[in-house]
Image (spheres, grey):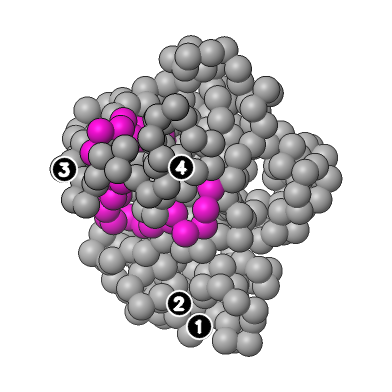
Amino acid sequence: MRIGVFAEGRTAVVLDGDDAADIHGRAAVDVSELTGGEPLHRLIEHGYDFAAELTRERLADLPRRAAAGLDWKPPLPRPGKIMGAPANYYDHVDEMPDSATIVDWGLFLKAPTSVTGHRSTIRLPWSDKRTDQEGELAVVIGKTARHVDPKDALDHIFGYTCVLDITVRSTEDRSLRKSFDTFTPIGPWITTADEIPDPSALELRCSVNGVLRQHTSTSKLIYGVGELIAYASAAMTLHPGDVIATGTPAGVGPLSDGDTISLTIDRIGTLEVAVSADGAIPYLDRPGHKGER
């Protein structure tokens, strides 16, 4: 099942044939009574059983729209946490200045306010600093996880989606360079975990302006999905709606004003965003800059 959010916060299920069934107001729980967050986030937090409640028979009676024509919003516009896995493909390590991997780096955090959605626009902050695309598989947590064994980790997943981990190449800490507003496009929807029983066999393709830059299989991850959940949950409690970006393969490259990025992952879909340098300023004019030492 593919579940997304379109204009005005309405939740939809994308069906075979790329029709979308509008399930807004049809859930078996009243989301207005749940704790904060957007509607889909709250349903995940509440443990809503989409597969059981939204059977094919029930969906058949709901209003349909063409999925391609909907204004898809981020399925999780403000995740509780966004964790990233640096250097989690060996071919990406080979294009980096040193040989350290995720084993050495651990995980990093991105600001939830960096999230944007399908067909949105990435805003480049600096006119003279390289900013790269990093196409990745994202894991959406569905059950609270703490000190999870890798063999049990997949049981804690709600689903999977596409994520672009946009990154400025400069000297600051990763979490800052990756947390500018619009630097975490997510979507266009979430494919539930029952549709992807084995996340280690997904093909990923990322193109810029129609030119393929990144192409891999998640079978090449250094830390697989289960290991990432176990690793993260050993340090911090994972809550429903938290997101783990699993790492990017080789082929990261600079972005320019007017570019279009397209990320496609098997069994999920295609996330597409534009790039704009409107408002970008020279790096040395950034707030807080006190001159070079």
Say what secondary structure mark 1 lies in: loop
User: In the picture provided, is 109 more to the left or to the right than 67?
Assistant: right
Magenta segment range?
Answer: 110-135
Q: Is residue 131 magenta?
A: yes
Q: Please, which residue is most extreme toward the left here?
A: 258
Q: Quadrant of residue 24?
A: bottom left
**Contact (CB < 8 A) between labels 3 and 2?**
no
Type of the residue with mark 1: Arg
> Mark 1 or mark 3, which has the lower sequence index?
1
User: In the picture provided, is 18 more to the left or to the right than 55?
Assistant: left
Label 3 packing within 10 angstroms: few (<14), some (14-19), many (20+): few
Q: Label 4 belongs to which residue? A: 178
Query: Which residue is drawn at the image coordinates 56% and 30% (left, top)?
Result: 86
> Residues under labels 1 and 3: Cα distance?
40 Å
Q: Position of residue 15 (x, y in %)?
A: 40, 61
Say what secondary structure mark 4 lies in: loop
**Contact (CB < 8 A) between labels 1 and 3?**
no
Query: Which residue is drawn at the image coordinates 67% and 72% (left, top)?
Result: 46
Q: Label 2 belongs to which residue? A: 23
**Mark number displayed over residue 217:** none
Residue 83 in sight from this viewpoint: yes
> Residues under labels 1 and 4: Cα distance?
37 Å
Residue 265 in sight from this viewpoint: no
> Residues under labels 2 and 1: Cα distance?
5 Å
Type of the residue with mark 2: Ile
> Mark 2 or mark 4, which has the lower sequence index?
2
Type of the residue with mark 3: Gly
Q: Is residue 86 magenta?
A: no
**Mark number displayed over residue 26:** 1
